[in-house]
Image (cartoon, rainbow, N blue to C red):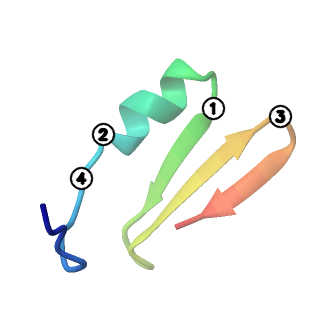
Amino acid sequence: MKLSTSCWVVVPLRFISEAFKAEVDWKPERNTVIIRSAGQVKML
């Protein structure tokens, strides 16, 4: 079986993050998601 390298996987990021007690913010002016958890901040 050959796997394509151009595939996309879409996950419910807010749902998964909040399930792990993270805060999720959406900044539409920058098209950015901010996830805060245990003192760490990730911007996607």
Q: Disc 4 vs disc 1: which is toward the camera?
A: 4
Q: Mark 4 or mark 3, which is nearer to you?
A: 4
Chain-order first, disc 3 or disc 1 = 1
Hey, what amino acid is under mark 2?
Answer: Pro
* Dots 1, 2 in contact, CB < 8 A: no
Label placed on residue 22: 1
Q: Residue at x 23, y 52 (%)?
A: 10
The circle on residue 8 is none
Q: Quadrant of the N terminus?
A: bottom left
Q: Looking at the picture, how far across and down is residue 24, in whole percent?
A: 53, 42
Q: Which of 5 and 31 is in front in this view?
A: 5
Lower position in the chain sequence, tag 4 or tag 1: 4
Q: Which disc, if any, is residue 12?
A: 2
Is residue 27 placed above or below 30 in the rendered structure? above
In-front residue for pair 1/14? 1
**Residue 17: horizontal and vertical position, in percent?**
52, 34
Q: Distance between the residues labelled 2 and 3?
A: 20 Å
Task: Give 43 or 1, whichever is nearer the viewer.
Answer: 1
Q: Residue at x 81, y 49 (%)?
A: 40
Q: Name the residue rendered at 60%, 36% in the picture.
A: 23
Look at discs 1 and 2 and give the one toward the viewer. Answer: 2
Between marks 3 and 1, how big is the CA–CA gap?
8 Å
Mark nearer the N terminus (4 vs 3) = 4
Number of the label disc, if any, that sits on residue 10: 4
Label 4 element class:
loop
> Distance of mark 4 from mark 1, alpha carbons?
19 Å
Q: Do the residues labelled 3 and 1 touch (CB within 8 Å)?
A: no
Q: Position of residue 9 (x, y in %)?
A: 24, 56
- Label 2: state its secondary structure: loop
Q: Are marks 4 and 1 in contact (CB under 8 Å)?
A: no
Question: According to the image, label 3 marks what residue?
Answer: 38
Inter-mark Cα distance, 4 to 2: 7 Å
